[in-house]
Amino acid sequence: MPTNTLKDPTNPELNELGNTKINRMILMRFTLFLLLLTALLVALSLPIYSEYETGLKEQLLAQEEVSVVSAKQMIQKEMYEQLHLLDMIVESNPLKNYLDETDSKQNKQLLEAMLKNISASFHRYDQIRVLDNSGQEKVRVNLIDGKAVTVAEEFLQDKSASYYFKAAKKIHIGQIYVSAMDLNVEQGKIVEPYQPTLRFTTPLEDSQGKPKGMLVINYSAKGMLEQFRDIMTQRVDQQGMLLDSQGYWLSNHERSNEWGFDLGKPEHKFASFYPNAWPKVKESKSGTFETDKGVFRYVSIEPLNFKDYQPAHFRIEHQPLIAESAFINTNWKMVIFIPKELINSYSFLYQPLGRALSLLLILLLPAIAFLSAYFSVQRKINKIKDQQLVALLTHRANFDALTGINNRRAFFELGEKELKQAHRQAIPLVALMADADHFKKVNDTYGHAVGDLVLKDLAKTLTNTLRDVDICGRIGGEEFAVLLPHTPEEEALEVAERLREALAARKVPLPDGNTLSFTVSVGLALLTTEDQHLDKLMQKADLALYQAKEQGRNRVVVYQETPAVEEST
Ligand SMILES: Nc1nc2c(ncn2[C@@H]2O[C@H](COP(=O)(O)OP(=O)(O)OP(=O)(O)O)[C@@H](O)[C@H]2O)c(=O)[nH]1
């Protein structure tokens, strides 16, 4: 069967594009587009939102800076006042007179009177005392229920074993030692309600420069811590912490976490709650860190460091001489916290407009994905339809609508190429021209439709009988042409004969159940060098065909330059 025809362009995809397939294509593309759009949205919005969130946190932290600064200044001012008071007592005449004449009863009474005045006026010194060089209390004024009371001589204690006595023993005249803040202990027991205390101590000497013990002031930090909490409660989350140098809470919004060290609860410290953050908080002066609960801002509070942290609004005439250990004891940290929920509540995405826009975006994504999928599938369908149209037109331009074999145009196009090749390679090429005999009669007798059936049958027999390399086509009403490449004349004659016989043997089935036989006449012409175009060769075959008809039909006649000779009947 000849395949040497122009290709049948029917695209199987075209016919299969049913509604189900289209819907499946839309669904697949919709899913793909939705995934892509979502990934794109996430990839674009995540960094933007993260930057926005960082900005928001910084903005919220900046608003908190007022509380940080005022708490820091309050504590430093409070400390400075205590140093000032200590200095004032050291420089006072009653103390100087007492140190010069410690045995004088009158001097002692005047000193006690002054200390009582100070204690009662300031309300923050639980104890003010003077120790001698051996650590024995010589003068002591207690503040009990808001009243300043002198302690009788028989109740004065030996404080030589106390840490503050030992610490102050190591410092020079003029230097001040400040203890770490702890809860006041009396007779080995923590005083309740708790009395957070700082001890200010300085060595004393008489007017001759002889060492005369030391002055010790127990400063009650309760008021200062209350002020700190007051400032913290003005903060946005009403929380804030003050840590000592070990990370124990001096103040915490959860009051039960305070004084872990003093109360024997070592786990009640910042490091246990935030083990990852504590090393950084401890080492650096200030910074931030974040947990899944929120953002923390920490800052060092060094209330005795007037060099680096002197607030602009208070003047210090002379820098107090602070003992090195005092700086270490009071190296506190203040930590404030902005909870995640609070940050979120400020976030645009949590505002009504933000929520509405997010929702809109979430709804828009599938809508965009669907429209893109729908239109891309439509585009594909249109492209296939265009291809189909082009294929159909190409098909129509090349194939005979009735028989499906090459039409005249395609036959001559393909044949011309074959002819050129035969010339080039000097190989034989034979043309056959076949024509149904008395076909008009068929039409007249059985009708045009039966005529068509015969022509279709003829074309089918033709293609079934010929080889793959042969070219055949319907070039006129009931006229068919064949080219037999690589075929010498004798062989071609056999083919033509076989063809004629096969056609004559055909019984075309008719719609009424009968069959119809017919014959063909065939003209045969061999390509010669003078046939430079197919027209010429076909004309020769046509002449031979004419002779076949002339000689009685149902026969094959070979074209001869001389009068044609009948080859068979
Ligand atoms: N049914 C049908 N008939 C066709 C078609 N094309 C041409 N014909 C008919 O074929 C017939 C050809 O008739 P003629 O040229 O007189 O030749 P013939 O009757 O075959 O006689 P000879 O060729 O001399 O044997 C005409 O009646 C055409 O109408 C077609 O596509 N279908």
Image: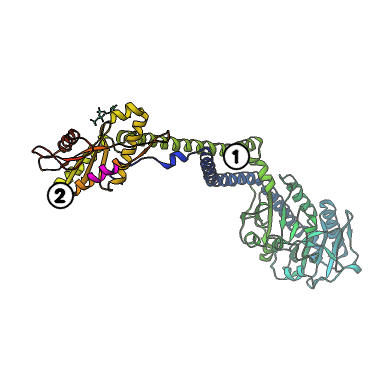
Name the residue located 29 percent from the left edge and 44 percent from the top edge: 502
Colouring scheme applied when the structure was drawn: rainbow
- In the rendered image, which quarter is residue 432 located in? top left
Q: Is residue 26 magenta?
A: no
Residue beneath label 1, please? 362
- The reply to whether the residue tagged 2 has its Cβ within 8 angstroms of ligand 1 is no
Picture layout, residue 521 above or below residue 189: above
Give the magenta range: 496-503
Q: Secondary structure at mark 2?
A: helix
- In the rendered image, which quarter is residue 306 located in? bottom right
- Relative side of 452 to 559, left or right: right
- Residue 137 at x, y percent in the picture: 84, 68
Circle 2: is it few (<14), some (14-19), or many (20+) Cα within 10 Å?
few
Q: Is residue 395 visible to the viewer in this orientation of the structure?
A: no
- Residue 498 at x, y percent in the picture: 25, 46
- Relative side of 175 to 213, left or right: left
Circle 1: is it few (<14), some (14-19), or many (20+) Cα within 10 Å?
few
> Front-most of 310 and 550?
550
Q: Is residue 105 visible to the viewer in this orientation of the structure?
A: yes
Q: Secondary structure at mark 1?
A: helix
Q: Could you tell which of marks 2 and 1 lies nearer the N-terminus?
A: 1
Picture layout, residue 447 above or below residue 239: above
Looking at the rendering, in which quadrant would you find the C terminus? top left
Q: CA distance from mark 2 to mark 1?
A: 71 Å
- Residue 445 at x, y percent in the picture: 34, 27
- Residue 96 at x, y percent in the picture: 78, 62
Name the disc covering residue 425, or none. 2
Q: Nearer the viewer, mark 2 or mark 1?
A: 2
The three-letter code of the residue at mark 2 reads Gln
